[in-house]
Amino acid sequence: MLHPIHMLPPEILAHVFVLLCRDAGTDTAQARTRTLLLLARVCGLWRDVALRTPALWSVFSAQVFPGRFAEKSIAKLDAMLSWWLAHSRAHPLNLRLHHPHRLPECTAGHDANVVRLLVESMSHWADVDLFLHASTLSLITSTLLFARNGNKQDILYLPHLRCVSLACLPIRGQQPSQIRLFANAEVPNLTTATLIKIAPSPARIVLPWHQLRLLRVQCDDVRASLGVLRLAPELEELNVEITGLGDGVDPEDGSMPAEFDNELDEAHTALRSLSIDMHPAAALANPLRDILGRALIPPLPALRNLVLPALTPSDVPAFSVLVTTRAPNVQRLEIALAALPHGFLHRAFLGAKNLKELQTRYAGQEGLRKLLYRLATGDRAQPKFLPSLESLHIESFPGHASPSTLPPEALLAVLRARGPKFNLSMSSGGGDGEHFIVLDPTPTVSSAGRSEISEWLEDMAREDL
């Protein structure tokens, strides 16, 4: 008896396959690849439908492993990529290829063929994630030039490309060469880029900087990572992760690299979100106070969302200037708070008059007590402490964000002072051990509780003198 699914018209069956592959799993590209191969093996009808549906072959994901399996791995990649591109035809292509290691000479033939296939498919790229060795990138560039018959003036048109992620392992002992994958190319729809181990500098990579809207950077060059704001005037979101020591920032030397040599106080009017994260070792060579200085960050009047690493006492003046004058319209702030001496907490947030949402990370108990006290008594201070704040989230190490580890009277004091619309939440741990707590904004407080709140406020006031 014929199964009902075999009675569907091929067009409907193809659409079902496309939807099934689209929802294949969390890692969409790899899961979709496996799902598609399984579908094509069920029966002759399904195989014919799959092979005649280019949209099914529009997502390709592969990873090449080094070592004794390298030759087999690259040969398999060569065959699979050739098969995929033949059946995707002219359909826009989502490509994920992680091939980060220099491979042995025995794979040179397959390696060159993979590069040739990549170059031939470039006009169909839509969303591309490439993690390649520097030698492989150089081979792509030379192959691309050869395909143009050596004419460097030929324009490569990439109409579908909207998102690109590039990661490159440099060759040890050699100065990184410029990545010219998109040199002499028109990419009118490219607005999103991710660069890993590649500094966002024209000397390092050719990109249409002027049209980027979202940029993620992971490297050890803090100057280039923030200096990109002067290259990309339309950038709306910049996420920076400093992973190594790099050259550090010289606070005495306000100079910028030559490509960033323009007026330092010229405002960047498009950026709405800025995230800066640093490895603890990187913070030694790149103090936050120097990163927030005028030499790296221009005025950001449109900035609404800000994420920063740990704020230490020496960082407070630069941070205060940033949120008071250079980025006065920040509404959401996520920051790690180190232990701040007397008065520093109030000074840090004095000018953050428009801040509506504050998320603290890994603050110690003493720092949190001071923050809660400031919030509970903010209306009495002149000027008021965070007058626009509507939400506070405390993220802590496991076991450090629960009512049992913070004084209940402190939490109640904040909720009573800030009113019923104020949101106060806490979380700790990660993965399966994460705990998330949202406190009742209108708690019932007994007379004894009100007395405890008053005593706590008096104790904190004496400490604050």
Image (cartoon, rainbow, N blue to C red):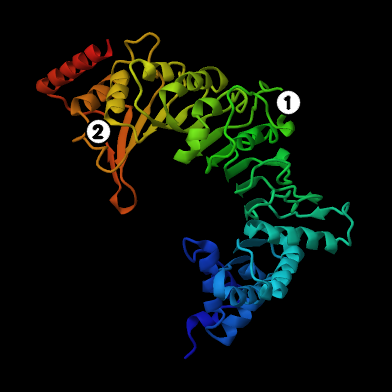
| Residue that carries the numbered disc 1 in the rendered image | 262
Residue 338: x and y in percent read 37, 29
Residue 320: x and y in percent read 48, 19
Query: Up-down: is 425 above or below 108?
Result: above
Secondary element under disc 2, as helix, strand or loop, is loop
Q: Which amino acid does label 2 sit on?
A: Asp
Look at 66% across and 72% down and name the residue there: 84
Q: Which residue lies furthest to the bottom in this view?
A: 1
Tags 2 and 1 touching, CB below 8 Å: no
Picture quadrant where residue 68 is located: bottom right
175 vs 388, left or right, is right
Nearest the viewer among 221 and 267 is 221
Q: In this rendering, which labeled residue sits more in front, label 2 or label 1?
A: 1
Picture quadrant where residue 333 is located: top left
Look at 52% across and 78% down and name the residue there: 38
Dot 2 crowding, Cα within 10 Å, few <14, some 14–19, many 20+: some
Residue 105: x and y in percent read 68, 72
Q: Which of marks 2 and 1 is nearer the N terminus?
A: 1
| Residue that carries the numbered disc 2 in the rendered image | 440
